Image: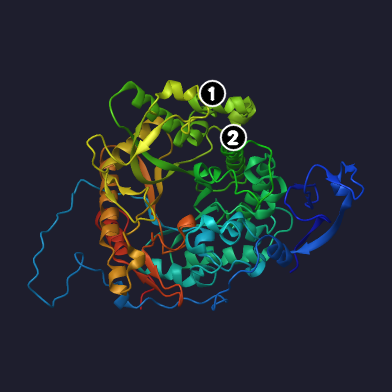
Amino acid sequence: MKLSLNICLLIAGLTLAAASNSTGSLLLTENATTTANNGSPVANPSAFATPITLDLKQYWDLFVGPVQTATINTTVEATPIPTSELVPPPPLYYSAFPSGYQSPLVSMNESWKFPSGFFWGVSSAAYQIEGAAQAEGRGPSIWDVFTHRATYLTVSNDTGDVGDNQYYLYKQDIARIAALGVPYYSFSISWSRIFPFGKGPVNELALAHYDDVINTCLQYGVKPMVTLYHWDLPLFLQNSYGGWLSDEIVDDFLSYAKVVFSRYGNRVSHWFTLNEPIEFCQEYPMPKGYFTAVTIPPEAQPFFCGHHALLAHASAYRLAKSMGINGTISFKNNGGYKIPLTNSTDDALATQRAWDFNEGWFANPVFVNGDYPQSLKDHVSTLGLEFTNEQKSLINGTADIFAHDAYTSYFYFAPDVGVADCLTNSSNPLYPGCYNSSNTGPTGWLIGAASDMYSPWLQRATDWVPAFLRYIQDTWPSGGIAISEFGWTEPYEELRTLKEDILSDYTRSAYFRNYLESVLIAISEGVNVVGCLAWSIMDNLEWTSGYHAKFGMQYVNFTTYERNYKASFFEYVNTFKLYAEDPVTPIFVE
């Protein structure tokens, strides 16, 4: 297969400033003007450009450079999981020998239940876990540039070139979760595998690969849940028109969604269009010198991204419904419960603004009225970002459930100068949100136990989960709330050398136990929680933290690709054995 595009290259050089035309060609220009040998200005430097054709490999070489490949580069068939691997650790299981231990018993709360139909499982994302960077026609994404060229963004220059190599080991990974009785697996599809340039030619090899991933899930009784976009924007779209900064991305995302829905819509029960638009929009502005220059002011770029992300999500949702796609369709919001630091009016105002500039940014348009919260609208309207009445109708109601990646919580308070003064001073570092946050409460104590040093934002604030879920239900009515990601980094796990130490991740186990107990409390109090997905199926590339932060419920040897269950995986599953009305049924065991 040879995928290619036409590119006009400047004789003067290759400083990127690109524009695409309707055929998908890319025109690279250096400056608005240049200078001839006689010193006279030339207004149109593209007159000195020449069209050439680059195949996909050449495009990789030009914009990313060499990538690593794995020692395993063909699909591996699954083998039954040895029963010796399925023995849970204490305190869930004690063998008959040795004797003499004493442990207080914790009785089950008979009033708690995960109702029938409650979905639960584990999660991953394509760039973080697949590897096989150039395999079978995958095009580069912006994260390939982040990790290869803008290397200061990631710890130890880690990349997703090989990673967990799940592109070839997915059968065994699915068999492993089936062996513990996990009923759902949530993963993302790589847009630049399906469309190597984000648009244009479709890669049948990629479609066939995900066909087999989905069919393997179904073969082992695991229901697939698919995210269309988990941050890995095709590089060509970023270089063509600025990616999410341009309204052109709406149609390109819609074309991508149509191909995926058409291919897999009859086999996937739950869909997520976008993962955490709050986060990927805050990647803008992109690092200078690595991507196409754009004219939108840096401070405005996240809001342009968010505006187009909402339109892209809504368009994909409407398309899926028009195609008769069954199951739930949503996007994944993110954040945490927001607690006023004091009972002052200004802290209350700052906390509300924090809701508006985080969850409300995307939840209000989708679940309330098709438009931004007022405090956010006051700001984005100054940027010319206002939805038409037609767009409001398009966006409103485009989620079947409220999916939220909810790891922790924070205290919020007003800026030192107060909210009002902050709003009048665009040079204030907290403008335009004009709120501040801390993981330390009013009495000086941390909101919860600290996680690993590579995720300083994460504390075990599970006591606040019931209040958080109630707030979501009261503020953004929906068909139910799904905790679409939650998880924990074991402190100093990367420093452990003995496998027994790595697998005994008891603070992660406690996090899952405490968190799920808080969900059960919320359900018992009338909150309609419909599902939860733990992050993550295994250790993987945690974006800018590289492979140093460990969220995995399975250990991965990144030399041999061996996987091993950690104690937390058993703790997670055991909670559903105790409290789920639907049975937990392990399969594919030796």
Residue at (54% x, 79% y) in the render: 71
Residue 585 in view (yes/no): no
Residue 226, percent across and down? 52, 54
Q: CA distance from mark 1 to mark 2?
A: 14 Å
Q: Could you classify mark 1 by the number of other residues whose Cα lies within 10 Å: few (under 14), some (14-19), or many (20 or more)?
A: few
Q: Image check: 196 left or right of 117?
A: right
| 379, 2: nearer the viewer | 379
Residue 368's place in the image compared with 398, above or below, is: above
Q: Nearer the viewer, residue 206 or 182?
A: 206
Residue 532 in the image: x percent, y percent? 38, 50
Quadrant in the rendering for residue 13: bottom right
For disc 2, the marked residue is 300
**Type of amino acid under label 2:** Ala
Q: Earlier in the sequence, mark 1 or mark 2?
A: 2
Q: Is label 1 in a helix, a strand or a loop?
A: helix
Mark 1: amino acid: Asp
